[in-house]
Image: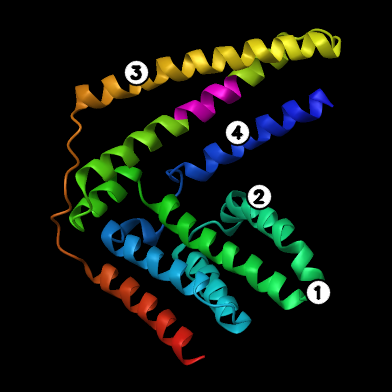
């Protein structure tokens, strides 16, 4: 039982870390689109997905997002790896209602999946620094953006720390041991995690102060590719309205 719990925590830590990471390995056309345009597009896609329970509209948004992702060169497999857990969780939550109304269950799950795809299209093609700069360009309060930036910079290292603690504990264990021994070692691992979290928080704050905490606003002009992507978003919204 404890081995299953450890594997679950390890896989969950790896999943959440990958969910938040910006995709650097492969460039796509969407990487070249201005972060301000992508941020607005993401908000539009999410609003379109969650503001209706009409299956046709939700399915249309989901298909449009998949097609856009494939056309611009994003890995659909990588997107699926990033969204499957939340999508599965949403389906389990709505499963009691889906038994009596299958359409409702499918629609609800597709709403979550479409929203996650839209969010991942932003995360995979835009660094968090660019997202924060785009937020400041839209006059979002600096204190809110700074808190968001600090939370992101802190969350990713902490998931890495938790994963490294679990891997180190697993590599040093030579026998299964009793349940009491496992719980005792587990308590030590939790204590070590909290100690490292305080240390990591201090290091992150000092690093941000050393490099400068000011978030630079976007000042560049929009390119033709930005207008093309905006037209695609508008086209999606137009079809959503007329369906």
Secondary structure of the residue carrying tag 2 is: helix
Q: Residue at x 20, y 41 (%)?
A: 215
Between marks 2 and 3, how big is the CA–CA gap?
31 Å
Label 3: which residue?
A: 202
Which stretch appears magenta?
Answer: 157-164
Between marks 1 and 3, how big is the CA–CA gap?
51 Å
Circle nearer the N terminus (2, 3)? 2
Between marks 1 and 2, how big is the CA–CA gap?
24 Å
Residue 11 image position (x, y, % from top left): 67, 35
Label 1: which residue?
A: 100
Mark 4 vs 1: CB contact within 8 A: no
Mark in front: 1 vs 3: 1
Relative to 91, say whether 71 is above or below.
Answer: below
Circle nearer the N terminus (3, 4)? 4
Mark in front: 4 vs 1: 1
Side of 34 where 124 appears, left or right? right
Mark in front: 1 vs 2: 1
Mark 1 vs 3: CB contact within 8 A: no
């Amino acid at each position: 039982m404890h081995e299953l719990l450890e594997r679950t925590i390890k896989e969950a830590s790896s999943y959440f870390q990958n969910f938040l990471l910006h995709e650097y390995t492969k460039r796509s056309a969407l990487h070249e689109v201005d972060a301000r345009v992508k941020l607005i597009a993401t908000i539009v896609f999410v609003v379109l997905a969650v503001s209706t329970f009409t299956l046709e509209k939700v399915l249309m948004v989901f298909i449009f997002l998949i097609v856009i992702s494939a056309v611009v060169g994003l890995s659909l497999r990588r997107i699926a790896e990033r969204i499957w857990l939340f999508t599965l969780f949403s389906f389990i939550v709505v499963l009691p209602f889906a038994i009596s109304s299958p359409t409702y269950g499918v629609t609800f799950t597709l709403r979550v999946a479409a929203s996650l795809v839209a969010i991942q299209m932003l995360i995979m093609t835009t660094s968090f620094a660019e997202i924060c700069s785009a937020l400041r360009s839209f006059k979002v309060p600096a204190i809110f953006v700074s808190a968001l930036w600090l939370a992101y910079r802190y969350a990713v290292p902490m998931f890495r720390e938790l994963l490294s603690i679990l891997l180190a504990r697993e590599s040093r264990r030579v026998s299964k041991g009793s349940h009491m021994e496992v719980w005792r070692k587990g308590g030590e691992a939790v204590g070590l995690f909290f100690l490292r979290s305080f240390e990591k928080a201090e290091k992150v704050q000092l690093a941000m102060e050393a490099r400068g905490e000011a978030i630079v606003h976007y000042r560049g002009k929009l390119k033709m590719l930005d207008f093309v992507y905006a037209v695609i978003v508008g086209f999606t919204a137009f079809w959503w309205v007329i369906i």
